[in-house]
Amino acid sequence: MKTQAPRTTILLLAIAQSLYSCAVITVFATGPLVGLMLAPNQGYATWPVTSFVVGSMLAVWPASYLMKIYGRKPVFIAGALSSIIGAVIAIYAIYHSNFYLFCVGVLLQGVLQATSSFYAFTASEAARPEDKSIAISWVLTGGVVAAVAGTLISSQTRDLLAPFTFAGTYVAVIVFAVLSLVVFGVMQVAKPTQAEIQGPQRTWPELLAQPKLVIAMATAIFSYALMNLMMTAAPVAMKICGFDVDASIWVIQWHVLAMFVPSFFTGVLIKRYGVNLITGIGMAILISAGIAALAGISFMHFSVALILLGLGWNFGFIGGTTMLTTTYHPSERAKVQAVNNFGVSLMVAIASASSGQMLSHFGWSSVALTVMPIAAIVLGIIIWLRTHESTSTAHSL
């Protein structure tokens, strides 16, 4: 069989990313709204999104180690199959007004999240070392299609199986997952070598002795968690403020566009100006998203805050992921990626679980006030890393 060109593999991963992103946008745009319809009280409205993240958290560690033994492709296929099963359960739960069963269906969608979190790493492994940031960026451009298609499909299919609102939306999720299976069917991903499976590995104290590894993980984890905290809360906050479902869906669409459109150039910016600078800018933009959210509760305020949130996530997450790929050997890949992705899932689970309670008890402003100081702390340690590396370079001359 002819070996697949790296560019073809990266393109297929970008297509898989777009299909995954469509499914995730559906969950994040409609999950809290289904929660409002089915939950025992408003404080539980974000539980479906929390269930999604918990599913990802539980699956990410075994997914990473199964990939180390069997390769990426079989695990990617398993993630798509889990999405199909979860969507079927979600539809059944909506039909029977069963909030907790709906959460189980969404939890299984989280397995897709867990497996898809390795698409960017897979792309970086297919690319030349100097092009890792570009490969990661290009995979994430798949989210641009999802930003438009995913939100439109969420809106247009919500009454497809009326009067069971949003049941039709999860039929669309099944379609996304089936198309993903087609993509994985033609994708060629190198199986792990014996050296990668059984090669020497440093202990965690040795790995964590690298400031860059710790900061890379912190950046990726908190970029995702802070983005999730505000994004999950936004549709519910907008509904409380009197906006209709279409308004919140459009805000989410612009947010997702801001998350992924910059991917066309983020990798190039990192290659040209350095990963520390671009990642630090991402944290600064997250702080500005919190400021915009505090400024008011008009449609424009929600829109600007969520757009800045998406852009900050893009720079922060791609920067952190790129930084991380430089801190481990191939034989250490599975354990480092597993811990990183588990950390992302854990903090996102805490963020999504907290967002509903924060809204219910303290209001929308409490979400913004949480984002700003955490992003500022991460920005501070990135500045420290950049200064530390500059000093080390000067001493070595």
Image: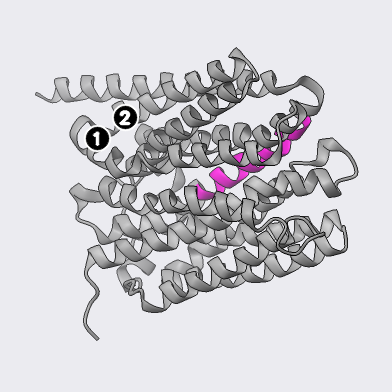
Q: Which circle's residue, 2 or 1, is located before the other in the chain? A: 1
> Residue 189, percent across and down?
34, 71
Q: Quadrant of the N terminus?
A: bottom left
Image coordinates of residue 267 in percent, x first then y, are 27, 42
Query: Residue flagged by tag 2: what amino acid is it?
Result: Ile
Residue that extends furthest to the left in the rendered view of this protein: 397
Mark linked to residue 160: none
- The residue sitting at 85% across, 49% down in the picture is 38
Q: Is residue 81 magenta?
A: no
Residue at 62% across, 15% down: 296
Q: Are marks 2 and 1 in contact (CB under 8 Å)?
A: yes
Q: Mark 1 points at which residue?
A: 269
Query: Residue 10 or 242: which is nearer the viewer?
Result: 242
Residue at x-position 23% and y-position 57%:
127
In the picture shown, does residue 276 fall above or below 248? above
Instruction: Give residue 278's mark.
Output: 2
Disc 2 secondary structure class: helix
> Which segment did they paint magenta?
341-357
Residue displayed at 61% across by 39% down: 347
Q: How crowded is mark 1: few (under 14 residues within 10 Å), some or many (20 or more)?
A: some
User: For residue 55, what is the image quadrant?
Assistant: bottom right
Q: Residue 216, how many percent across, how many down?
A: 40, 37
Q: How far apart are marks 2 and 1 (CA)?
A: 7 Å
Magenta stretch: dominant SS?
Answer: helix
Relative horizontal placement of residue 396, taking residue 16 as reference (left or right): left
User: Can I make out residue 351 in this image?
Assistant: no
Toward the viewer: 103 or 243? 243
Local secondary structure at mark 1: helix
Left or right: 92 as drawn, with respect to 26: right
Name the image quarter holding the C terminus.
top left
Establish if 139 lies above or below 46.
Answer: below
Mark 2 is surrounded, within 10 Å at the Cα level, by few (under 14), some (14 to 19) or many (20 or more) other residues, namely: many
